[in-house]
Amino acid sequence: MASRSEKCASEPQGLQPNDQDEKYADESSAPSAQPSPPNEAEDSLSNNEETTYPEGGFQACWTSFLRAEIKTEIGTDYYQIILAFSLLTGAGTSLIMNPAVTSVAHWFNERRGLASGIAWTGSGIGGVIFPLMVQSLLPQVGWAWSLRAFALILFVLCTVSVALCRSRVPPRNGDATTWRDTIPSARIFLDGTGAMALTTAGAVLTDLAYFIPVTYIPSYYVARQHLPHHTTLTGEASFAYQLLAILNGSSCVGRLLAGYVSDRLGRYNTMILSLFLCAISVLCFWLPDILIPNMPNTGLLIVFVMLFGCVSGSNVSLMPVCMGQLCETQEFGRYYATCFSVVSFGALVSIPIAGALIDAVDAPGKTKFWGVAVFTGLCYVAATLCFAWVRLRVKGLNWKTRW
């Protein structure tokens, strides 16, 4: 299951109909890179009331996603890249990912955190493979064939997902369920406790912060080492791609660990701790690396990348698990879709805000990233407070309570 944040590919600048492949062979831009549910025994894979997860809709989403990847590689004008890679791929990815995430909650309750962590490890593995694959293929075969190879891999993986994805718990209204019962609803936020609203706010702040290091660490490394952009793919700056692979590899470990711990300490308890550690990693490791001039080596940066990758794994794997604490299993899909319909706007503005902050800092080299690091750290602090407020509001001050 490929995460939306870990698909990192360089974008061609100024594409022309006949020279996009040659341009990539020569130069490239820097890489971006409420109350608990009923205690129901859902850990065993019971076949009772088993239904195929909307096959028609899921397959249509899968087809749209792959079509977007294919249309991206044959685009010759910039607006075609926007339509295919941004709009169609974005919509297809969301429509594939949400049913897959929701189906995990149908099969697990007591060990839902670990199950979610295992499922989300797939996106971390993709985050390791795809940047290195792009780094290797672009100079050799160009932009179009790189995306064709990318689309072929996605075709195989999505085919397996469509074949295996199943739901178990029937809709609350049974056969009387209509399409209106499945779409996001703002009424979910009016639960009388504010738990859903504050959880969503925390998720927005988390996505605002999470995408910035994932995207800008490669560019930061290029600026830190004072390297020219044309060396990004095969020259000295190629380590920028490897940093992204290290981050996502560490994230795989963090997702499994956070899921395992959350089933024992509580989902919100683990999320609060993880977000706090994310803030610490950014403000105490990345920010000093930015501000200290003439660092003799990249040791501090590598420590930050590994630490942030590990503790930020919970940003994606625990978020749906925390959402499951606020609703019953039958309603999980609608709660998750409602939350992330709002969160998507945070993901939309995250990178433009970071870019504006970098442009606003009049400083040479790596020091122009200090504003971005401070913004990222403060977003994590605010997200921690949101989740802590929900935890206190629902379960009180007894932190020994597993929730």
Image (cartoon, rainbow, N blue to C red):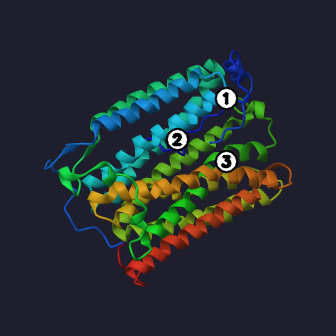
Q: Amino acid at mark 3?
A: Ile
Q: Amino acid at mark 1?
A: Tyr
Q: Position of residue 259 (x, y in %)?
A: 39, 59
What residue is drawn where x is 77% and y is 34%? Answer: 229
Q: Position of residue 320 (x, y in %)?
A: 40, 57
- Asked whether disc 2 touches disc 3, contact meaning CB atoms under 8 Å apart, the reply is no
Q: Amino acid at mark 2?
A: Gly
User: Which is nearer the N-term, disc 1 or disc 3?
Assistant: 1
Circle 3 Cα neighbour tier, 10 Å, few/some/many (<14 / 14–19 / ≥20): many
| Residue, disc 1 | 78
- Residue 318 visible, this angle: no
| Residue, disc 3 | 217
Circle 1 Cα neighbour tier, 10 Å, few/some/many (<14 / 14–19 / ≥20): some
Of residues 261 and 93, which is closer to you in this image?
93
Of residues 27 and 235, which is closer to you in this image?
27
Is residue 176 rendered to the left or right of residue 68? left
| Residue, disc 2 | 127
What residue is drawn where x is 27% and y is 42%? Answer: 53
Q: Nearer the viewer, mark 1 or mark 2?
A: 1
Q: Position of residue 151 (x, y in %)?
A: 48, 27
Q: Under tag 3, what secondary structure?
A: helix
Is residue 179 rendered to the left or right of residue 288? left
- Give the residue furthest to the bottom: 397
What residue is drawn where x is 27% and y is 50%? Answer: 178
